[in-house]
Amino acid sequence: MDAKRQEVDIILIGAGIMSATLGMLLKELQPDCTIAIYERLEVAAAESSDAWNNAGTGHSAFCELNYTPEQPDGTVDINKAVKIAESFEISKQFWAYLIEQQRIKLPDTFIQSVPHMSFVWGDENVAFLKERYEALRQCYLFQDMEYTEDTAQMEQWMPLVMEGRGKGEKLAATRMALGTDVNFGALTRSMFGQLMEMEGVSLYFNHEVKDFSRDPEKGWLVKVKNLFTEDKEWVKGRFVFIGAGGGSLPLLEKADIPEGWGYGGFPVSGQWLKCTNRAVIEKHHAKVYGKATVGAPPMSVPHLDTRFIKGEKELLFGPYAGFSTRFLKSGSLMDLPLSVKINNIRPMLAAGLDNMALTKYLIEQVRQSPEDRLTALRAYMPTAVMADWELEIAGQRVQVIKKDAEKGGILEFGTEVVSAADGSIAALLGASPGASTAVSIMLQLLQVCFKDQMASAAWQARLKEMIPSFGNALAENKVLCDRTRAWTSKVLGLKIPE
């Protein structure tokens, strides 16, 4: 191998929200570190982080009912919701710090105040929502949540949802005015814009990582191909992060670390109905989530969703799930077959047999007609007409399949960091809630892969500057929760609930 090859401290693979977040954190914690970033596409945030591709923006567990499962005894488990809500608050603190310190320049529409609502119908679902509301209200993070079964109140909160609805139907809704919409594509590109101006950082578009080799000294040698020139080179890095969205699993398999053996992936594609009628778009200002169909993956929870994309207010409904063997929207149909290896075939087969309901659901979704999609939309917007909506292709998600002692293999619907025992390489697998919790996920990665530095007084002090609640549980500290929310809302230009 060429002795003149490039050498850096950090190699980041993929120009999405995760790599951008990790890069910004590392340059704040260790300004003299050198970073090389490789992205196979022409721009940053073109896959999962892009606004049209992202199944959920501003995930904070305020309205997503799948984060609060009902237990057999009728109680509601709020642990996952609390963890996600706290993680989103950590993200907001880091963004507020970057803006306050003039580290990043963001458009005003990067983050907007958009109320988060849950909406259900039927006696059983109404009982569940009320139980959920009562449970969440015990946590400081959800103390401002409102609940109603009053039709007039719901008409004020979400007129499009209530317009044309029949009388006498049992309905209920919750509302969190503190909810937001986040354009993670804009955020990601702003972060990379700042990183490119920093000393010691290089960003290479149209460069694809092809292989890995352990460096005899320490770290990794990464083989990179320039997709324009077809030239290939080996780059040496002391630490490698694989943050390539759906493309992370094939790259983790190429690295061939024992910790990655047994992992597989199950791709789920998606589509939106996008409103094209400006008058209709302006009548709705909320993210209204309902209950998922039995067997549906978490990112397919139906929602009528206000978004801000490229400075314009938009209205989406969906997502409608589908199946493709691609791991990326711009990937290959061979992605899934080529990901099957000797070490993961048993977990993948076991997870497949254990999730027949998901398979059935995806087949039904793929076979949907435009009329079927309109029927689903009308459950949330009774007056919807097809002329006001068009189909938009969403991004790909790859759910984690992992070994399980009891079942052989299980399908996971969250995100998971897989790292080598020596902390020299790590990959992020999975999907939801993803981008909204990027800062927390990267802090967890730093705890594992930069253990000594994270234990140092210098890094601990810097982290406290960037994230005032670092090391404390906001869910258990009302004063700290209120203070940090007031600060982030002011810096980010969000409405503070009365």
Image (cartoon, helix red, strand yellow):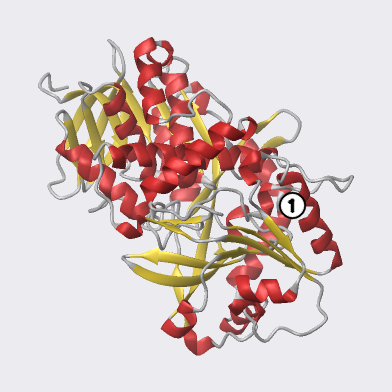
Who's the residue at 47% across and 36% down the image?
A: 90
Task: Check the image and report above or below for 283 versus 319.
Answer: below
Against 76, residue 315 (above or below) is below
* Number of marks present in the image shown: 1
Asked if residue 412 is positioned above or below residue 148 in the image, the reply reads above
Whether residue 467 sits left or right of residue 101 in the image: it is: right
Which residue sits furthest front? 498
Horizontally, residue 216 falls left or right of residue 345, namely left
User: Where is residue 173 shown, x and y percent of the image?
Assistant: 70, 64
- Count residues near mark 1 (Cα–Cα under 10 Å), then give few for <14, some for 14-19, many for 20+: many
Which of the two residues, 91 or 339, is positioned nearer the viewer here? 91
Q: Return the x and y of residue 477 as percentages of the image width and height.
A: 61, 30
| Picture quadrant of residue 331 | bottom left
Mark 1: amino acid:
Tyr
Q: Position of residue 140 (x, y in %)?
A: 64, 39
Name the one closer to the observer, 119 or 354.
119
Quick check: 330 left or right of 344?
Answer: left
Q: Looking at the image, which is closer to me, 291 or 330?
A: 291
> At 41% across and 52% down in the image, what residue appears?
48
**Rendered residue at 49%/82% (across/down):** 280
Q: Quadrant of the C terminus?
A: bottom right
Residue 412 visible to an observer of this rendering: no
Is residue 30 left or right of 325 when viewed as pictured? Answer: left
Instruction: Where is residue 27? Give x, y as percent.
Output: 26, 28
The residue carrying mark 1 is 133
User: Where 151 falls versus 352 (above or below)?
Assistant: below
Residue located 79% across and 56% down the image:
130
Tell me the quarter of the image containing the N terminus. Answer: top left
